Each structure stands twice: as structure tokens, then as C-alpha cells.
Image: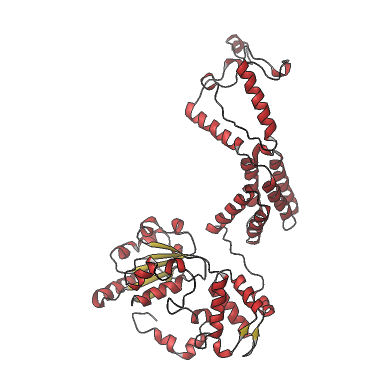
Amino acid sequence: MDIFDGDDNNIERDPVIAARRPLADRMRPETFDQFGGQEKIIGPGTPLRRAIEEGRVGSLIFWGPPGSGKTTLAHLIAKTCKGDFLPYSAVVSSIKELKEVILRAKKRKKMYGVATYLFIDEIHRFNKAQQDAFLPFVEDGSITLIGATTENPSFEVITPLLSRMRVCVLERLTQAHIEKIIDNALTDAERGLGSRRMNIESKGREYLAAQADGDARRALSVLETAADDLTDGKEITYDLLKNVIGKRSIIYDKSAEEHYNIISALHKSIRGGDIDAGLYWLARMLKGGEEPLYILRRLVRFASEDVGLADPFALTFCMSAVESFRFLGPPEGELAIAQVVIYLAAAPKSVSAYKAFGQAMSEVERSENLPVPMHIRNAPTGLMKDLGYGEGYIYPPDSDTPFVDQTFLPENIANRRFYYPTERGRERKIAAHLTAFREYRKKK
């Protein structure tokens, strides 16, 4: 029922209809005191809480994981500020429909002074043009727009709209929060399962809270399903909950921010030498459905950039893992990826080659096309030899010394240094060679 056409609270007052609503919906907090979690942004005395209590809330974006309370917070804000709450979803609602609602909200505010809080779930699903349509109404105060998203608004919400809204980051609920929500649902006789006199096994409570992964809605949905399998007065056990939950899905969106967060965690764990953390993040990616060859490409890059010449074999090892995976396929081939993660985490690290190459590229951009020294030019014809091409070149293998007295860089940058080796791993030998080479040059 449209909020402008009547009192939608009648639905909630009807005991028959209310009983049919899902437990997660029935247990939705009705006051801020009942709301669990998000103390940092909505706790007593916080700026947002004060703004809500004083009725001066501007447009907001709630960014957080599923089940963290985005919709509930929007509803509580509208209720506390004594405004109309209009919930819509970007998945099923059209901009034309929303514009009509907004124009009616504008008239209602003008006639009765009642503010409208337009809540758009999954606001990131609207494209740029659709998001643009909200701008004039947000600017003139026709509505207070509250958007909810599980995606980073920096990437998914247009800058003009983002600049006019306050972003509130909601955190995943802790296990303690979820356990309290479970207990409340079991004891609340009016909205929850209290009238059925059910209790939950301690081990089961801990298991359910852990498997919910910070999602209160998920926890309550599983609890309701388990309770439906029992008669009144029975205990909800760990075994029953394990059977209801089954194989838990891994939260991992290959096209969204979590994808980049987890690959970053893998990369940094290996760089920090933490083998166990590296294996954990690898498992998260594989369980979440990540393409194994994508992971291997990142590991090959890591071997080249982060391990470098401190252990040149790391790159060969990575390429062998690529071939192993292609030959075996999953799941057997995934072990080769795990071996690479372990090897790279334990390997000495050096970015000297990476930095040296970057310096050389910068020099080329800066000095452009410096001429090749005459003594190292190619001289395939008699004319070129007559012009001095290759003249004075010393062939190192014929020399009695390990080095030869000649330069190989253009004259303008003859003394330029790009590569500064470390003393880590096998790079120690390269450093010794370079020291001897430069000492010889200095004497000559």
C-alpha cells in the first residue's frame, strides 16, 4: 500500500498478517535502543544520532554488507523524525515511477509540512542518467534521499549526487551482536518465537552466529527454518542447524570491491612472508569461484616484481605451476597454486629490478633518442665500417680481464645508474659482480 493512500501500519497491526511475515522482518528493531551494532555511527551522542534526534538529517548513503541494518536504520530515521518512509528497490523500480512519487512528496511537504524519506535499496543499480534524476529533488529539499549499497559508492554513485549526501559506512555485525539477536528472537513472545518456549543449544548458537557471517537477516532466517522443523518446547541443536545451513556460500563478488580487497590481501600477505595468511586468502578466492589462472597471473607478476632477482627461480616455479594447473585442472591443479603461495611467501624479496627498469624507462622518456655510441654500433657493410661503426669495440670473451675498458651507454648519460641490488638471496652475487664492475670502471 502506498504510504500516501492510507495507513500501512494497519498491516502490522493485523495479528494474522503479522504472523505470516518472516521472522527477520518481524524482529526488525522499532527503536534505536533495540538496534544492535553500528555504535560508531549511530550510538548515543554520535553526530548522526544527534542530527536524527533533532530532526535535521540530510540525505545519506549507507554502505555496508548484507544484513548490517541499512534498511532498518533508514526506517528508524524516518520514524524518529516523524516523516513518511517510502522504501523502493533500484532493481524493480523505475525512475519514472520514483519521479511521480517525489512530486507527490513535494506537494505533501508544501501542504502539510511532512518530510519524505525516500529509501532506495541497491542504489548502485541505477545508471548515471538515472542517478542524475535525483539531483534537483535532493538539492531543493523535496525529499531526504537515503541510499543503501553493498558496493563502494566512490565507484558506483555519481560524483554530483555523492557530494550532496553523507556516506555512512556500516560494519559487519560481530558474533556477539548476532548471538544477542538470536536470543531476542527466541524470547520475544510478541514478534519472535517466545510463545513457542524454545531454546537453543549453546554450541548451536555459536555455530549459527559464526555461519551468519555478520548478516542478522541470514541468522534469523536459518533460526526460523530450524524452528519450523520442531514442535513447541524443543531445543534447537547444533546438528539441526548444521543440516539447515548446509554448505555456506562464500561472500566473494568477482566483479566488485571484495574481489580487489581479497587479491590485495593475498598479495600483501605473501609480501609480508605470512604463509598461513596467504593460503587462507587463496582458499577464499578459490572457494568464491575465482578463475585460478587469474590468481596464477597475479602470482607470476609477484614473482617478477616482488621477489625479483633475490630468487630468480621463483618466476620459473610460477610458470611451472601454470603448466601444472593447465595439465591437471581443478581441484588437483589447485595444489600447485598453493605450493607457489608458500614458496613466494618464504622467498627473499627484492624490488630492485622493478625499480631499475622503471628508472630506465623514465630516462628514455626524459632524454629521448640519444645516439648509440659508435664502438657498439652494428657494421654489416663496408661503408658503415669506413664511417667508424664498430671501431674500437673490444670483444669481452677475448679479454684477459673479467671486464673491458669501454662504455655502453650514450655519452650524455655514461655514468647513469639505474640498478641498485640488495644483499638478499641470490641477488647478493649480482651485487658483488656490480661492485667489481664499477670498481674496475673507476680505476680506468
* 27 or 251: nearer the viewer: 27
* 393 or 426: nearer the viewer: 426
Q: Is residue 376 visible?
A: no
Q: Report how many numbered discs are placed on residues in the image.
A: 0
> Where does residue 176 sit, x and y in percent of width and height?
56, 72
Residue at 58%, 56% (x, y): give it.
262
Q: Quadrant for the C terminus, please.
A: top right
Residue at 66%, 30% (x, y): give it.
431
* 17 or 113: nearer the viewer: 113
Residue closest to the far front: 45
* 221 or 423: nearer the viewer: 423
The answer to whether residue 46 is above or below residue 113 is above
Residue at 57%, 36% (x, y): give it.
355
Residue at 58%, 61% (x, y): give it.
252
Q: Quadrant for the N terminus, please.
A: bottom left
Q: Is residue 382 visible?
A: yes
Q: Is residue 172 left or right of residue 266?
A: left
The answer to whether residue 173 is above or below residue 290 is below
How was the colour assigned to the protein in this rendering?
secondary structure
Residue 156's image quarter?
bottom left
> Where does residue 398 sit, x and y in percent of width and height?
73, 16
Q: Is residue 417 left or right of residue 122?
A: right
> Where does residue 31 sit, x and y in percent of width and height?
42, 78
Residue closest to the far top: 386
> Where does residue 209 sit, x and y in percent of width and height?
60, 73
The answer to whether residue 102 is above or below residue 280 is below
Q: Is residue 171 left or right of residue 293?
A: left
